[in-house]
Image: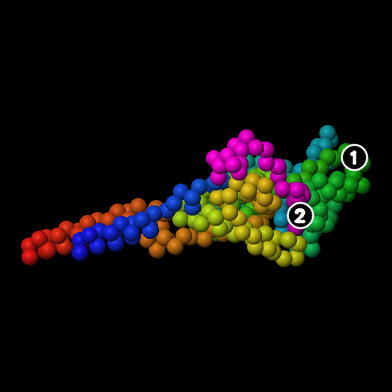
C-alpha cells in the first residue's frame, strides 16, 4: 500500500514538472547536424518598411535656420520637451498619444498651416516626402521636415509578466525586443504556441509562432509591427498554481503526501 502511494506521488510530481524543452528559446542550437552556431541566417525576404495605417501615431518635426518660419509649429516643439518626461511601456503612459499626430480613419493627419494630408498607405519615407512637398509650397525649401513612427505599440495578453499595451521607442523591433519589453513570458506560457494577431489593410490575420524553434529568426514574424497583439496560452499545469507559487504548490503537495505516507506507515505498523 505504501509503495503504491509512493509511486502515485512520484508520478504526480513528475507530471507537474516542466521540461526545459518547453521553456527554452531557439532550441537545437547545439545540434551540429542541423544548425551551426556561427551560421549566417538571413532575414525573411519581405518588405520591412512599415505601411502607415489609420489610427497610427506619427511624430513630425520641423526645423529652419529662420525661427520665425516655424513659429506656427511651436506647439510641436513644446511637445518634444514634454516627451522627455514621458515613460514608455505598459504602465498606461503614452506621451505621444497626446503629442503626436494621429492618423484618422480616412488616413489623414492635420498639420498646422498645411491642413489635412493623407499619409496612410505610405511608408515613413514616402509620407515624409509628401509633407515636405506640402511645406515647400509655402516656405520654398526653407523648412526641413522629419517624420517617423512615434514608437511601436503592441499588446500582450496571457502568460506575460506584464500584460497590456506596450511601447518600444524604435522604428524596428524584433519579437525578442517585444518579449523583453513586456517583462518576459511567465514560466507557464506555451512558448511553442504563441499567437500573433496582425493588421493587414482592411482586416487581420492570426499567426502561430514557435519561440522554441530557431527557424523563427528567418521568419517574417521575427520583426513585430505597430498594433500587433501577442497572446500566449498557459500550460495545463496552470491548475497547480501560477508561476510565482508553483514551487510552493508542489512543496505543499509533497508535504501532504509525506504526511499521508507517515500516517499510513504508523497505522499499518501498529496493526
Q: Residue pushed farthest front?
A: 33
Residue 12 image-quadrant placement: bottom left
The foreground one among 50 and 191 is 191
Q: From the viewer's perspective, is the residue at label 2 or at label 1 nearer?
A: 2
Q: Position of residue 120 (x, y in %)?
A: 79, 57
Q: Is residue 86 visible?
A: no
The foreground one among 171 and 92 is 171
Q: Position of residue 196 (x, y in %)?
A: 62, 58
Q: Bounds of the magenta span?
A: 28-53
* Residue neighbourhood size for the residue with mark 2, other residues' Cα within 10 Å, grouped as few (<14), some (14–19), many (≥20): many
Helix, strand or loop status at disc 1: loop
Is 82 magenta? The answer is: no
Mark 1, residue position: 141
Q: For the point 22% across and 56% down, which residue is it?
A: 258
Helix, strand or loop status at disc 2: loop
Per the rendering, the mark at residue 76 is none
Q: For the point 16% across and 58% down, which residue is it?
A: 262
Mark 2, residue position: 52
Main secondary structure of the magenta stretch: loop
36 in relation to 257, above or below? above
Query: Is 32 left, or right, of 257 in this rendering?
Result: right
Q: Is residue 11 visible?
A: yes
Q: For the point 76% across and 62% down, which residue is it?
A: 201
Q: Position of residue 181 (x, y in %)?
A: 56, 47
Is 47 magenta? The answer is: yes
Amino acid at each position: 500500500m505504501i509503495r503504491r502511494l509512493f509511486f502515485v506521488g512520484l508520478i504526480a510530481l513528475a507530471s507537474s514538472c516542466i521540461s526545459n524543452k518547453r521553456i527554452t528559446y531557439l532550441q537545437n542550437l547545439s545540434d551540429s547536424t542541423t544548425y551551426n552556431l556561427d551560421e549566417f541566417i538571413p532575414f525573411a525576404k519581405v518588405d520591412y518598411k512599415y505601411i502607415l495605417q489609420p489610427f497610427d501615431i506619427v511624430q513630425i518635426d520641423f526645423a529652419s535656420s529662420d525661427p520665425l518660419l516655424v513659429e506656427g509649429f511651436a506647439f510641436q516643439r513644446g511637445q518634444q520637451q514634454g516627451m522627455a518626461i514621458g515613460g514608455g511601456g505598459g504602465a498606461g503612459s503614452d506621451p505621444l498619444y497626446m503629442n503626436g499626430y494621429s492618423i484618422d480613419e480616412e488616413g489623414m493627419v492635420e498639420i498646422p498651416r498645411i491642413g489635412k494630408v493623407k499619409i496612410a498607405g505610405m511608408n515613413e519615407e514616402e509620407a515624409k516626402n509628401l509633407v515636405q512637398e506640402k511645406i515647400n509650397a509655402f516656405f520654398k525649401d526653407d523648412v526641413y521636415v522629419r517624420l517617423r513612427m512615434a514608437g511601436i505599440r503592441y499588446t500582450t495578453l496571457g502568460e506575460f509578466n506584464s500584460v497590456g499595451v506596450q511601447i518600444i521607442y524604435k522604428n524596428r523591433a524584433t519579437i525578442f525586443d517585444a518579449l523583453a519589453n513586456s517583462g518576459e513570458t511567465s514560466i507557464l506560457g506555451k512558448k511553442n504556441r504563441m499567437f500573433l494577431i496582425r493588421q493587414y489593410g482592411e482586416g487581420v490575420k492570426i499567426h502561430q509562432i514557435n519561440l522554441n524553434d530557431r527557424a523563427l529568426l528567418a521568419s517574417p514574424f521575427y520583426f513585430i509591427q505597430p498594433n500587433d497583439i501577442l497572446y500566449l496560452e498557459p500550460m495545463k499545469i496552470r491548475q497547480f498554481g501560477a508561476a510565482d507559487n508553483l514551487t510552493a504548490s508542489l512543496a505543499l503537495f509533497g508535504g501532504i503526501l509525506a504526511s499521508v505516507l507517515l500516517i499510513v506507515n504508523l497505522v499499518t505498523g501498529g496493526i
